Image (spheres, helix red, strand yellow):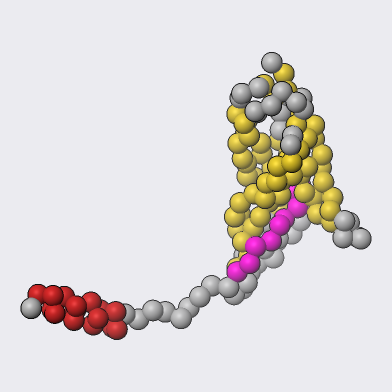
Amino acid sequence: MKKIFLLSFLVFSMLSCNVSDQTQSFYTEIIPIESVTIPEEFQFGQVYEIGVTYFRPTGCHIFNNFYYDINENERTVAVINTVYDDQPCETFGAEENEVEVSFNFQVNSFDTYTFKFFQGQDDNDNDLYYIVEVPVVE
């Protein structure tokens, strides 16, 4: 009897739930990096905070994560924003909404690291990068 009651209760609960049809519409967008704070040299085995600054174009752009690609001692870095496009968004001017974010980098090699920070595209849709080489010292 208890099993029948429990089963009936679960079925009734599932049927009576009102799941809202409201869904948010969003997509991700890579945003150009404006400036970078990075040490001039690394020490092997240490962890460093690397900061980047970018301008958030609208109030619907929210920091999501970093795009981070590794190719031997080369690192390509870009900022990824989630853009909520189902609501009215305030558009910001060039310097009204500066955002600073950072990531930690652990030095695991004695070779020089090359960082390529994405800065947008030129008129021919070629990617532009701010390139920084950071030597590793003992």
**Furthest residue toward top:** 138
The part of the chain drawn in magenta is 26-34
Q: Is 114 displayed left or right of 101 in the figure?
A: right
Q: Where is residue 84 in the image (x, y as percent from the top left)?
A: 60, 68
Above or below, 113 relative to 52 = above
Quadrant assignment, res 45: top right
- At x 75%, y 52%, the residue is 32
Q: Considering the image in quadrants, where does the N terminus appear? A: bottom left
Q: Is 11 displayed left or right of 107 in the figure?
A: left
Q: Where is residue 11 in the image (x, y as percent from the top left)?
A: 25, 81
- At x 63%, y 34%, the residue is 105
**Furthest residue toward right:** 124
Q: Is the magenta stretch mostly helix, strand or loop?
A: strand
- At x 60%, y 36%, the residue is 104
Foreground residue among 73 and 101: 73
Asked whether residue 135 appears in the rendered view, the answer is yes
